[in-house]
Structure formats: structure tokens, C-alpha cells
Amino acid sequence: TPLARPRRAVVGEELQGLRGRGVVDTKILDIGCGKHKTPGAIGLDSNPRSDADVIHDLDHVPYPFPDDEFDLIVGNQVIEHVSDLLAVVAELHRIARPGALIKLDTPHYSDIASYTDPTHKRHLTTESFAYFTGDRPDFDFYSHVRLRPRLIRVTMLKLWRLLGFELLVNSCNRRPSLRFFRRFWEQYLCFVVRGKTIYFEFEVLKNRNREP
């Protein structure tokens, strides 16, 4: 899975894909980069002992970047630490170029790691970003941000992978009609067949008529 692979390999493949779409001078932002900043990225972190190029708290908006600045934004195990998810996603959307990619990973809410870290402020599911993807039109008024999901993948322990649960839970990535299985697992089974992480990959959509 992408989470089990080195950042350099994953980002290298993504850069090739962006260049194939005509993006030559790719700008990458690594939010909450810590001591493992993505190669070639601008690192953003609140801790001065990190490898960040810019010291800034994600909960303090706006960020010190202009609109439409980045082609790729990555956040490795950081989004669960923010206080206001709506504000942070709106700010990432602002500084991303149209068609840019936002790639995030986080503990699944059924994993004990989601609760053992006292700095975690939220516990996320595969549908935690539905307000931004149009999957919850009844709550459309919460945000002007629009993201197109390219991939939402759950990882599990080796036992559940060998038994085929991880494959079934992620089958909706290839066949959207199978999404009911992921929803059933997440609502009724996930505290037995536990998830470990969720990997989100979104494409940034911008419609200036919607934005304030």
C-alpha cells in the first residue's frame, strides 16, 4: 500500500503523473512534515526542531502562501491533530492549484493508535471528508470547498489482509457499486476486524463562482 512505501518512491511516481498532465515545475507542500520531510517539498510544521522550511501552526489560518501555489500537498499522520478540520481543508484548497492533488493518511478510528496519542483531536472514518466531495449534499452549505476523491484506501493488519478483508473493504475503489460493503464493515464490524490507517487522495476542484 502507499503507506508502507517510502515517501520518495510514492512522491516520485506522483511527480511523473503530474508531469504527464503537463505540470512541469511541480511545487509540493508537506504539512506537519516533522523530521521526515518529503523530498523536494516545502515543509510546514509548528515545531522549530523539525525539518520544516516554514514554521507555522496548521490551526492558524491563513497560511503564509499565496492562492493557487501548490501542485501536490501531502500530510502524513497529521490531519488527526488539527482542531478545525473544515478550516484546514479550506486553507489547503485555497493554496492548491486547480487540479492539484491532496494526499493524506491518518489512523482509522477503529485502530487503538487513534486513541493512544493524547495529541489526536479527532478520529476519522473513510467518509470524514464527504462534506467536500458532494457525497453529503444535505450538508453542502458547510463549505465551498470541492474535492474529487481519486482513492480512499483502508489498511489492515496482516491477518485480515491474508483473509481477504482488506481487499473486500477496498473493492469499491474499482467498483463503486460495492461501497455498501465498506459502509457495513465500518458501521458494524470494524471494532472486530479492525482497520489501521486510511489513505485519502483528492483532486482539487475550483469554481470561482462558489467561493466567497
Image (spheres, rainbow, N blue to C red):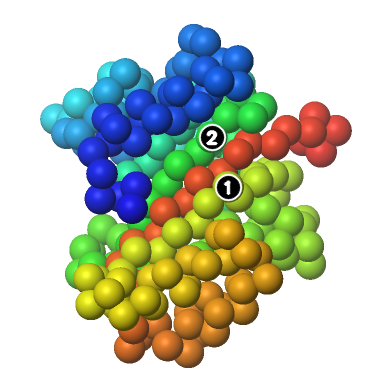
- In the picture, measured across the screen, residue 170 lies left or right of residue 108, that is right
Of 106 and 14, the residue lying toward us: 14
- Residue on which the image places disc 1: 150
Q: Nearer the viewer, residue 185 or 170?
A: 170
Say above or below: 128 vs 91: below
- How packed mark 2 is, by other alpha carbons closer than 10 Å (few <14, some 14-19, many 20 or more), is many
Quarter-wise, where is residue 10 in the image?
top left
Q: Is residue 115 visible?
A: no
Percent position of residue 67, x then y: 61, 21
Would you identify the image quadrant in which residue 165 lies?
bottom left
Q: Amino acid at mark 1?
A: Arg
Q: Residue at x 47, y 51 (%)?
A: 200
Residue at screen point 50% across, 38% down: 102
* Image location (x, y in percent) of residue 178: 62, 73
Indicate which disc residue 101 carries: 2
* Residue type beneath disc 2: Leu
Q: CA distance from mark 2 to mark 1?
A: 9 Å
Do the residues under discs 2 and 1 have CB atoms within 8 angstroms?
Answer: yes
Q: Residue at x 60, y 15 (%)?
A: 22
Relative to the observer, which residue lies in front, 54 or 105? 105
Residue at the location (68% across, 71% down)? 177
Res 73 visible:
yes
Q: Nearer the viewer, mark 2 or mark 1?
A: 1
Image quadrant occupied by the C terminus: top right
